[in-house]
C-alpha cells in the first residue's frame, strides 16, 4: 500500500492514537457497515469488547470513551473536544446510545462495553470486537478490528491475509526502504522532499499538499499555544499538574541570556503539546499521539531559532519527516503495543531529526544519517505508562526525544553523510528489538515504571 504524508500526520484528539483515535475509527466503521448492509434499523443492542493492551490500559487512554463516541458517529479529525464530556454524560445518564447520531438503542455499560484483560485477539495486541443484535437477541453482525498505531485500523479478516483491497493510487517514484529512497533521489537528481512531493501529486496538487502541510503545522502551533495557557491538573489518578505554563512564563521573563536557552524552549514546546494530548485536546499524530510533541517542538525550534526559517522549510521538513515515518510503518511498526516506546518516541525522534536537516537544506545522505542517529539511541525504549495514563513518563519523554532529534540533526549536518550504520539496519534492529521485548513493556502498564511508581 502506498502511503501519503497525510497518512502519517493526521489531526485528531488525545490522549492516544492507538488507544483513542483507532478505537473511535473502528467503532464508527462498524456502525457504518451496519448502515451499509441495511442492519442499523434492526439493531437494538451493540456489544463492544476490548482485548490485550486496549483492555489493560484502555481506561487510562480513554478507549472506552472513544468507542462510545465512535459508535455515535464521531471521528477524531472532526470531533469538537469541548463536546466530549457532555456527550459522555448524556450516554451514561440516559443509558442510551445514538448510533451514527440517529438510531437510539439501550446501553448497559458493564454488559455492553467489556474489558478482556487476560485475553488477546490473535493478530495484534490492540484488538476490538463488535457484535450487533436484534430485538430477539439474534446476532446481526460481528466484526473484529486491530488498532495498529497512528490511528490506523485494519479489519481482522484482512490482517496479514492479503485480502484487503488496496485503493491507494500508484505513485511515480515508489520506495519501500531508505536504500531505495536514496537511490531514486540519485537516479532522478532530486532532493528527498522533491521526490516525496512528486509522489504526493498522486493524491493532490502541489498547492493542495503545501496548504495541507501548513495546516498541519498551524494545528501543531495552536496546540503549543493552548498548552502554554492551560493551567491546573491533568485528568486521571495521578493528579499531575501541568508544567508547561509555568516554564513558558519563566522563559518569557528570563529573556535569551542562558546558553541553554534554545533547549529550554525545545523542552517546553514538547511538554506543552503532550500535556494537551494527555488532556484529550486537539493534536497531530506525528506519527502517534504518545509521541506527538517531538515533531512540533523541533519545528517550533526551527521557526524561532534558525536564521532564514520559512514556510518553505516547514514544508520540506514535513515532507521528509513523513517519508521517514512511512519507512518505519512499512518495515516495522509505529505501535507502542508492538514495539514499545521506541516505536513511538523513537520513530518521532528519527522523523524530526531528518526533517530538520531537510529544512536546513542538508543533503539526502545527511537526512538519512540524522534519521538513523535519532532511532539508534532510542533502541529498546519501553512503553510503561504509570496508571495507564499518557502522562508519566510520556510528557517528559517527548521533551527528551525532541532534544535527541535536534542533536542528531546537528551531528549529521556537520558531517558529509557517510556513516557505518544505515537507516534500514536500524529500522530492522528496532523491529527485532520490539519482537524480543517482553509484553509487559509494551503499553500494558504491567512492567517498568508502571509497577514501580505509586500512582498517588
Image (cartoon, helix red, strand yellow):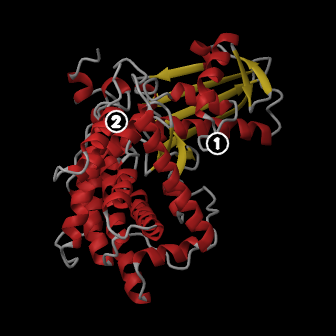
Apparent side of residue 341 relative to residue 191 in the rendered image (left or right): left
Task: Name the quadrant containing residue 305.
Answer: bottom left
Q: Residues within 10 Å of mark 1 (few under 14, many from 20)?
A: few
SS of the residue under disc 2: helix
Q: Look at mark 2 in the image and give the residue it sits on.
A: 244
Instruction: Please provide percent x and percent y for residue 254.
Output: 24, 42
Q: Nearer the viewer, residue 343 or 286?
A: 286
Q: Is residue 114 above or below residue 204?
A: above
Residue 449, how many percent across, how many down? Answer: 23, 28
* Distance between mark 1 and mark 2 Cα atoms: 26 Å
Q: Is residue 54 above or below residue 152?
A: above
Residue beneath disc 1: 78
Q: In the rendering, at what x and y percent does residue 197 appear? A: 52, 74
Describe residue 268's horizontal placement relative to residue 83 as left or right. left
Screen quadrant of the N terminus? bottom right
Image quarter of residue 268: top left
Q: Position of residue 309 (x, y in %)?
A: 38, 67
Residue at (34%, 35%) from the top-left corner?
244
Pick the quarter of the image with the C terminus.
top left
Amino acid at each position: 500500500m502506498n502511503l501519503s504524508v497525510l497518512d502519517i500526520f493526521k489531526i485528531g484528539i488525545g490522549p492516544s492514537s492507538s488507544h483513542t483515535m483507532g478505537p473511535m475509527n473502528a467503532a464508527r466503521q462498524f456502525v457504518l457497515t451496519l448502515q451499509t448492509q441495511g442492519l442499523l434499523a434492526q439493531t437494538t443492542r451493540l456489544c463492544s469488547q476490548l482485548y490485550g493492551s486496549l483492555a489493560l490500559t484502555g481506561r487510562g487512554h480513554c478507549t472506552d470513551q472513544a468507542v462510545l463516541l465512535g459508535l455515535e458517529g464521531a471521528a477524531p479529525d472532526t470531533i469538537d473536544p469541548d463536546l466530549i464530556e457532555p456527550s459522555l454524560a448524556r450516554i451514561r445518564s440516559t443509558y442510551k446510545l445514538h448510533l451514527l447520531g440517529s438510531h437510539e438503542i439501550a446501553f448497559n455499560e458493564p454488559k455492553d462495553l467489556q474489558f478482556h484483560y487476560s485475553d488477546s485477539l490473535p493478530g495484534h495486541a490492540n484488538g476490538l470486537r463488535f457484535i450487533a443484535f436484534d430485538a430477539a437477541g439474534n446476532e446481526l453482525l460481528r466484526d473484529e478490528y486491530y488498532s495498529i498505531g497512528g490511528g490506523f485500523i485494519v479489519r481482522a479478516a484482512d490482517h496479514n491475509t492479503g485480502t484487503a483491497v488496496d485503493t491507494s493510487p500508484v505513485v511515480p517514484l515508489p520506495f519501500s526502504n531508505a536504500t531505495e529512497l536514496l537511490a531514486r533521489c540519485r537516479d532522478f537528481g532530486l532532493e528527498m522532499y522533491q521526490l516525496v512531493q512528486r509522489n504526493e501529486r498522486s493524491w493532490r496538487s502541489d498547492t493542495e499538499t503545501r496548504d495541507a502541510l501548513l495546516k498541519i503545522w498551524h494545528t501543531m502551533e495552536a496546540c503549543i499555544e493552548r498548552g502554554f495557557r492551560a493551567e491546573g491538573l491533568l485528568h486521571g489518578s495521578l493528579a499531575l499538574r501541568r508544567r508547561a505554563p509555568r516554564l513558558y512564563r519563566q522563559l518569557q521573563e528570563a529573556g535569551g541570556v542562558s546558553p541553554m536557552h534554545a533547549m529550554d524552549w525545545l523542552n517546553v514546546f514538547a511538554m506543552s503539546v503532550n500535556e494537551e494530548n494527555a488532556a484529550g485536546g486537539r493534536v497531530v499524530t506525528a506519527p502517534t499521539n504518545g509521541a506527538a510533541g517531538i515533531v512540533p517542538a523541533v519545528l517550533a525550534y526551527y521557526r524561532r531559532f534558525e536564521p532564514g526559517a520559512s514556510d518553505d522549510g516547514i514544508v520540506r521538513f514535513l515532507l521528509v519527516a513523513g517519508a521517514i515515518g512511512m519507512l518505519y510503518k512499512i518495515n516495522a511498526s509505529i505501535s507502542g503495543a508492538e514495539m514499545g516506546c521506541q516505536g513511538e518516541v523513537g520513530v518521532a525522534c528519527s522523523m524530526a531529526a531528518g526533517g530538520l536537516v531537510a529544512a536546513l537544506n542538508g543533503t539526502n545522505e545527511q537526512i538519512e544519517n540524522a534519521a538513523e542517529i535519532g532511532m539508534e539511541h532510542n533502541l529498546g525504549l519501553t512503553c510503561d505508562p504509570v496508571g495507564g495514563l499518557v502522562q508519566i513518563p510520556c510528557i517528559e519523554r517527548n521533551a527528551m526525544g525532541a532534544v535527541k532529534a535536534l542533536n542528531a540533526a546537528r551531528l549529521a549536518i556537520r558531517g558529509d553523510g557517510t556513516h557505518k550504520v544505515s537507516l534500514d539496519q536500524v529500522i530492522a534492529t528496532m523491529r527485532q528489538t520490539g519482537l524480543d521485548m517482553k509484553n509487559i513493556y509494551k503499553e500494558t502498564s504491567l512492567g517498568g515504571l508502571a509497577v514501580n511508581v505509586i500512582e498517588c
